[in-house]
Image (spheres, coloured by chain):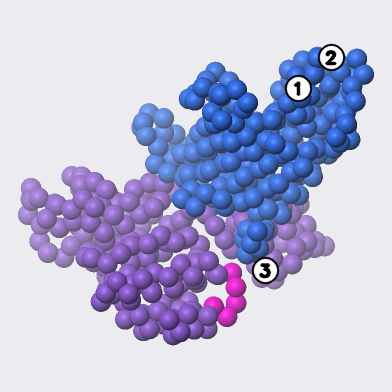
Chain colours: A purple, B blue
Amino acid sequence: MGKIIVKDKSIVVPGEVLAEGMDFLPAGGVFREDERIIASQIGTVSINNRLVKLIPLTGPYSPKKGDMVIGEVNNINFGGWSIDIDFSNFAMLPIKDATSSFIERGEDLSRFYNFNDIIVAKISSISKPNLIDLTMKGPGLMKLKGGRLIDITPSKVPRVIGKGGSMISIIKEKTGCKIIVGQNGKVWIKGDGFESEKKAVDAVKMIEELAHTEGLTEKVSEFLGGK
Amino acid sequence: MAYERKDRKLDEPRKMEARVGIIKRADGSAMFKMGDTIAIAAVHGPRNLYPRFMQNPKKGILRVNYNMISFSVSERARPGPSRRSKEISMVTSNSLLPCLNLHEFPNSVVDVFIEITQANAGTRCAGICAASMALADAGIPMIDLVSAVSVGKVGDKIVVDLDKKEEDYEGGTTDMPVAILPRKGEISLLQMDGNMSGDEIKIALELGKKTCNDIYELQKNALRDKYSGVKK
């Protein structure tokens, strides 16, 4: 019979032994060595019956199918665009998924998305760990004009969005800004003026800093309301 | 020649300090201080690797750059890569690789920059300690942290964590940097400069392992402190 060595929800570092015994199963962020389960990243432990999992507190973005991401056009190729989505490899946006309008043979592709354009796209497929295909077909997927783009740690994106989008809708409501959060840790903010944009940026930065604390929604609404 | 260590015990390392997340623009960063030796490490990546012929489609590569800042030593060090810094970059890279899992990042590179801002012997060990914390801070999957310390023989005594004064001791010095993966006790770096008998090496290694375990605890606490929101 195995035993759990660390407490649930505690912060662990790579190489720390989480559990002993073959009756526990390793999930994301951990691995098995002999009979022990060991953390491979910094994160909080989550124990669900026999499943030992690690929720990372830091780390690079790991793409998943169906993620909405914000990226920058890096290159225009024959078959489409290559997009920088803050991953170690560029993602591909093929012509057929790029736009609903008709593209003639030999047409200038920069008419649709030019270099340095910022787009919101969805990951349509991942083949092998490094070949990512994007699509622009879907609700809310578009080219972004104006506004400002800030970076946050990808592992803190769920906190910025909140449960069922609660956190992000508070910021939207209080500042009157348009906000789009990409799963890759990019946040696009556009408001009526500098003041409201600055307020929204500060709120997002604050969430990133205090992501591990509880009662964050109240803190944020207090921060936005009192200012 | 009989050597006497005045400021601390023979098996006692210098005062150590570790801090994580000191460079904002890097993906991961750390500082490791050992007495008067200070190493800063910054990790960038995994990111795209160019030139293209260096890419490995099976796994990512690790690129380590060790640099001594010109004001880190009493006599100005000539800036830029040297024979020494290239060798240390290579051995550091080799000592960090066994703990990293880079299979998830094919065709890309993880860059580690180690800057020595103040040197008083044992810089490669401080650099390795800082780099392994910075890699963990960057969120690269690792099987363990790496801890390193130099052990050796000064005169007739086997000591741990030599400082510059001891390295230059007239009665003869042997310097042996050791890096280990503490959980399993595997050695990932072992160099030696000087003479020691087989038995002496065994004693020194045991001493090194013991000190590395202390360093390991320090590294773990520094990492935990950053992520549990403890401000220093």
Return the x and y of residue B163 as percentages of the image width and height.
75, 29
User: Could you tell me residue B99's position as x and y percent?
Assistant: 64, 40
Label 2 packing within 10 angstroms: few (<14), some (14-19), many (20+): few
Query: Residue visible at 53% across and 80% down?
Result: A219
Mark 2 belongs to chain: B
Q: Residue B167 carries which label?
A: 1
Q: How far apart are marks 3 and 2 (CA)?
A: 54 Å
Q: What residue type is labelled 3?
A: Lys
Provide the secondary structure element on which disc 3 rests. loop
> Please, what is the three-letter code of the amino acid marked with disc 2?
Gly
The answer to whether A158 is drawn above or below residue A30 in the figure is below
The amino acid beneath tag 1 is: Glu
Residue shown at 51% from the left, 22% from the top? B78
Please provide percent x and percent y for residue A100.
Answer: 16, 65
Residue picked out by circle 2: B171
- Residues shaded magenta: A212-217
- Assess whether mark 2 and mark 3 are in contact (beta carbons under 8 angstroms): no
